[in-house]
Amino acid sequence: MSAAPPQGRVIWFTGLSGAGKSTLAGALYAELQRRGERVELLDGDAVRENLSRGLGFSREDRDTNVRRIAFVAGLLARHGVTVLVSAISPYRGTRDAVLAELPSSLEVFVDAPLDVVTQRDVKGLYLRALAGEIEHFTGVSDPYEAPIRPALHLRTDLRSVDACLTELLTLLEVRDVAHA
Ligand code: ADP
């Protein structure tokens, strides 16, 4: 019989739309892959196209979306995969609950002020939300509850992508040493 796979880990990126979750999760994904790690990316937008198709943006639907992502992340982590989750996941209580259930999970708060993410307006949604054209838009017409004690707090308006990536890699190294 072969040995059980080593326990994976889940790195959960939370923050406003446009804060930099996908960018940083993607950069970390590429680096971990380059190092030969087993790594998977669960991106909020892709999940909503597939696993959570049909869900809306009510509190209940957002929580369902987060719980589904956590479920899949847990399955992958059980098989030794490092799972990078990039999802707004706006409700602290729900995040705390799902992260507490996941083995070796780390919460990363990807943070930039509302005026910065509005200026970036990566998907062109903030202008529409501010014009009242989109209901339940996080940060504008829907709440975002910031983490209180994240494993890492990255201010993406103050640090470059590379600097944030370095912090993420250091976090993983420290965590791995602690769990060795
Ligand atoms: P989210 O996934 O949180 O909605 P995205 O990653 O899609 O956000 O978009 C973030 C935008 O901010 C990108 O255009 C990215 O190039 C830019 N950006 C600037 N600085 C940073 C940084 N330090 N980390 C991540 N993204 C950054």
Image (spheres, rainbow, N blue to C red):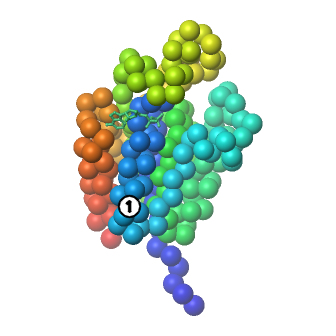
The residue shown at (50%, 48%) is: 85
Residue 28 at what x, y percent from top left? 38, 52
Give the mark count. 1
Q: Quadrant of the C terminus?
A: bottom left
Q: Nearer the viewer, residue 68 or 22?
A: 22
* Residue type at the position of mark 1: Leu
Residue 111 against residue 126 in the figure, above or below: below
The residue shown at (65%, 48%) is: 68
Left or right, residue 20 beside residue 3: left
Query: Residue reaching furthest right?
Result: 54
> Residue 129 occupies which quadrant of the picture?
top right
The residue shown at (26%, 50%) is: 166
Left or right, residue 179 beside residue 99: left
Report the residue marked by disc 1.
32
Residue 119 at what x, y percent from top left? 40, 19
Residue 123 against residue 132 in the figure, above or below: below
Residue 84 against residue 180 in the figure, above or below: above
Q: Is residue 178 visible?
A: no
Ligand 1 found in image quarter: top left
Neighbourhood count class around disc 1 (C-alpha, 10 Å): few under 14, some 14–19, many 20 upward: some
Q: Nearer the viewer, residue 59 or 20?
A: 20
> Residue 79 occupies which quadrant of the picture?
bottom right
